[in-house]
Amino acid sequence: MKNPRWQGIFPAVTTKFHADESIDAEGTARHIDFQIRNGIHGLVTCGSLGEASTLTLEEKLQVAKIALDASKGRVPVLANVSETSTREALRYIAGANEIGVDGFMVMPSVIYVADAREAMLNVRTMAEAARKPLMIYNNPVAYRVDLKPEHMAELADCEWLVAIKESTDNIRRITDLRNTVGDRYQLFLGVDDLAYEGLALGCDGLLAGVGCAFPRETVALYDLMKAGEFAEALKLYQWMTPMLHLDVSTKLVQNLKLIDAIVGVGTEHMRRPRLPLIGAEREFVEGIVKKALATRPAKYQSVA
């Protein structure tokens, strides 16, 4: 199998809902098209930001199909696999393969805190079932399961594993991964407010959250870093950083959907138990986003 060499900006897209919590297919498709037209390089459906934990397996397949239809082959569409058992993960992978997703992002384990032996076997089992390119999503901060560089080296013989989304919140991990596995995997940084640092250390791309509302600006940050224009990239990153902090929160869905609504590229509708922000929390986010919009760099501005 030829490594697809995924790189660039892959938003973890939000799932759009109507006020009654049903999936807003048209709104989801429109938002994906907006991001593609503004230069993103790929996308991932139904991750944490996409409210996967509130969706049925069939609904997650529905969202993946919406993304495939909206992308029309312009960018790779990856389906996130975050089922609570290997059995359900394989059922989801089979359904996603049937509708033609380009690849998968897989969680080593969710809810159950698997050890490395269990997590690695889970990844291998999903990879063999998928037989399509996979990105491993490593997030010990949120999910308490950590596949370390030595584990990624052990998994390197699995041909379907092509990329890692690293979200340890420890930027040292990127260099440790490179020193351990070299260029065996494409490395994506999954923590919004470490984007500059990750790209400076040689990451191949970003799994972006705030990039859902500001895709062109996020792509510009990536392009500037890859071109070695670090000073210009730093100015853009410093402008974005107050918003990027909002992705690193237990209320990232509420925060980022409020950003979408303020920017005019989505609504705040979400599934309970999540509720839209109120009071001081809401005012805090609104203040950050309104300041960002007032100082937005015109030459990098996303086009509606």
Image: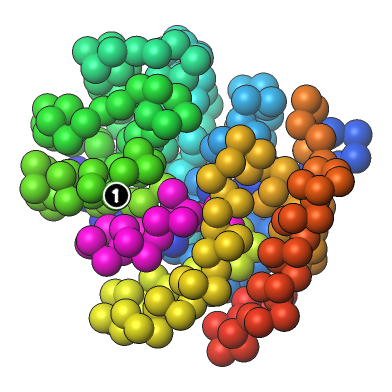
* Residue 246 point in image, percent of width and height: 60, 51
Quarter that holds the N terminus: top left
The reply to whether residue 18 is in sight is yes
Q: How is the image coloured?
A: rainbow
Count of all numbered marks drawn on residues in the image: 1
The residue at 25%/37% (across/down) is: 161
- Based on the picture, tell me whether residue 207 belongs to the magenta stretch: yes
Residue 132 lies within the magenta run: no
Q: Residue 217's spot in the image, x, y percent?
A: 53, 74
Q: Quadrant of residue 24?
A: top right
Residue 177: horizontal and vertical position, in percent?
17, 44
Q: Position of residue 196 (x, y in %)?
A: 37, 65
- The front one of 267 and 284 is 284
**From which residue to which does the magenta span run?**
191-210
Residue reaching furthest bottom? 299
Residue type at mark 1 is: Ile
Name the element at disc 1.
loop
The residue closer to the viewer here, 168 or 58, is 168
> Circle 1 is placed at which residue position?
171
| Quarter in which the C terminus is drawn | bottom right
**Residue 266 in view, yes or no:** no
Name the residue rendered at 27%, 58% in the picture.
203
Q: Nearer the viewer, residue 163 or 235?
A: 235
